Amino acid sequence: MTIFQKIIDREIPADIVFEDDRVLAFRDIQPQAPTHILIIPKKPLVSVAQMDESDHEMVGYLMHRAGLIAKEQGLEDFRLVTNSGAGAGQSVFHLHVHILGGRPFHWPPG
Ligand code: AMP
């Protein structure tokens, strides 16, 4: 079981900013920007690489909700990131989108 499943199940605490029946959003424990929130599906998908067609609506909703949360946090400009696979920087194998804002971001990312 991943640490994010334990947060969903309330086995470990998190600073939750949004929750409904499909998604949960909470503050990253090691923030990389003044605002750094993770939004995850309650369904235990590993990453976007494991999605199938039955996940389209839910992940579309998750992305829409990520944008709404960014705006609620007062962010005009923000970055959404999802890492898929350890080589891309994924360390928790439960799909999550990072919502990052509050400082300038550069391109290409590191
Ligand atoms: P990634 O490297 O893309 O898999 O991102 C995983 C993120 O989860 C990292 O930014 C970690 O800081 C964050 N993280 C790990 N454990 C926790 C936790 N218990 N609560 C909040 N964020 C966490």
Image (cartoon, rainbow, N blue to C red):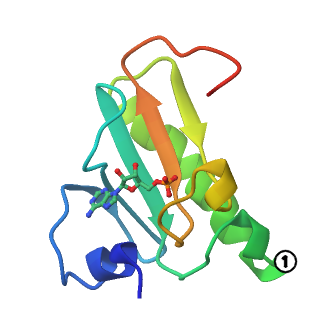
x 45%, y 56%: residue = 39
Foreground: 33 or 89?
89
Q: Residues within 10 Å of mark 1 (few under 14, many from 20)?
A: few
Q: In the rendered view, would you say 105 is above or below 14?
A: above
Q: In the rendered view, would you say 106 is above or below 54?
A: above
Place of residue 27 in the rendered image (x, y in percent of width and height, measured from the top left):
28, 49
Place of residue 72 in the rendered image (x, y in percent of width and height, measured from the top left):
35, 34
Label 1: state its secondary structure: helix
Q: How many marks?
A: 1
x 68%, y 54%: residue = 87
Mark 1 sits on what residue? 53
- Which quarter of the image is occupied by the N terminus? bottom left
In the image, is 78 to the left or to the right of 86?
Answer: left
Foreground: 69 or 87?
87
- Which quarter of the image is occupied by the C terminus? top right
x 28%, y 74%: residue = 7
Does mark 1's beta carbon lie closer than 8 Å to ligand 1? no
Place of residue 77 in the rendered image (x, y in percent of width and height, measured from the top left):
51, 18
x 17%, y 76%: residue = 12
Place of residue 40 in the rendered image (x, y in percent of width and height, measured from the top left):
48, 64
Q: Residue furthest left?
A: 13
Amino acid of disc 1: Glu
Q: Residue furthest right?
A: 53
Q: In the rendered view, would you say 13 is above or below 52?
A: above
Q: Quadrant of ligand 1?
A: bottom left
In the image, is 29 to the left or to the right of 23?
Answer: left
In the image, is 1 to the left or to the right of 88?
Answer: left
The answer to which quarter of the image holds residue 74 is: top left
